[in-house]
Image (cartoon, rainbow, N blue to C red):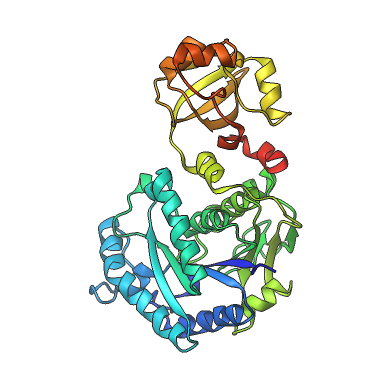
Amino acid sequence: MAKQRIVVKIGSSSLTNKNGGLSLKKIDEHTAAIAKLIEQHYEVVLISSGAVSAGFGDLGYPTRPVTIQGKQAAAAVGQGLLVEAYTDAFKKYGIVAAQLLLTRDVFSHEVQYSNVYSTLTELMKRNVLPIINENDTVAIDELTFGDNDMLSALVSGLIHADFLIMLTDINGLYDKNPKLDPTAVRYDRLTGITDQILQQTKHESGTKFGTGGMKSKILAAKTALSLGVRVFVGTGTGENKLLDILANRGDGTYIGEHLTNSIRKQKQWIAFHSPISGKIYVDQGASEAIVHNGKSLLPAGIKWIDGEFEAGSVVEVIFNERVIAKGQVNYSSKAMILAKGESSQVAMEITMGNKPEVIHRDKMVLLMEEAYQNE
């Protein structure tokens, strides 16, 4: 039986002391709990914040910096200190750890995205624990994940994890902020993330030391669910806390039940990370074939093309002003203009191409709501 893969995400609020600095005591507790998982033959990937918290003291800051320059400088110092703390702690259990620093643009490039998957797969095959963090020293606003919550969801999908555990300082998701409203009610179990739940959640951070509030965790959970990964959001103490969570004894909210769906790596890249280079407008027959019958897009169903792009680009497929799919094209926009509305045979003759499909089904994703049901 294949090992279950667990992604554990630890936020800054679960790693810091009262002054906002890195707590080695908390590091030791987390590593002990992860070591228990590995001892029980789980494959584990750790997503850890904490580089800024680990580094700001050595820079002479009295408290966690608030400027971008200060945070990036603190992260530059802290990344080495953070991974050193983890490495030393895991050595006590005979566990080798490896560090991966990622930015959003790595995920937007298909080759680099595939390389991340290959690296993680090789590390796990060698029984090495990957520790992943966003590369805060170089990340800029438009290239960030916003926080490590979304990063943990995307990594969970990429490696086809069975479960994502998001540890934070609040024991689950509530209908109101429990720190401000004593009538707040916790959701113990959710089958999915509704718009109502999103609207109920504010975007503020759980503590002054964290960057991702409960809304970011809900958005991350929604993404993980769409990729077939169940989620836990909550807290815990002691070396058995992660095993307790997996045994449904966790202090928090469990999201998703009986998920068996997973989306292949290439489709994940198309769905979540690929830049959009143009639009293809299709007729009703093509729309029904794609959405309801699981078919590829053929040139006969194309009405017109918007934008200039080359073969291999990702485009949106549109019917009645609604985006029904995204996919990686086999032909350039110039070739498609010549071939639209034609049979596949005629289209290949006109364009001197060798592929009958404009977008093959294996390189196409539906809207995520539909993909979750039909992919």
Nearer-the-camera pick, 355 or 24: 355
Q: Residue at 52% x, 64% y: name it.
A: 206
Quarter holding residue 285: top right
Q: Position of residue 149 (x, y in %)?
A: 51, 58
Q: Residue at 35% x, 79% y: name it.
A: 84
| Side of 254 where 78 appears, left or right | left
Quarter holding residue 277: top left
Q: Residue at 44% x, 69% y: name it.
A: 131
Q: Residue at 52% x, 14% y: name it.
A: 347
| Side of 292 where 356 appears, left or right | left
Is residue 147 visible from the viewing direction of this image?
no
Nearer-the-camera pick, 99 or 17: 99
Q: Where 166 sits versus 30, above or below?
A: above
Q: Quadrant of the N terminus?
A: bottom right
Q: Where 105 sits versus 238, above or below?
A: above
**What is the residue that sits farthest to the bottom in this orientation?**
92
Q: Position of residue 75 (x, y in %)?
A: 31, 66
**What is the residue that sits farthest to the left in this orientation?**
60
Is residue 198 visible from the viewing direction of this image?
yes
Q: Position of residue 341 (x, y in %)?
A: 57, 10
| Side of 57 where 300 appears, left or right | right
Quarter holding residue 294: top right
Q: Position of residue 172 (x, y in %)?
A: 65, 65
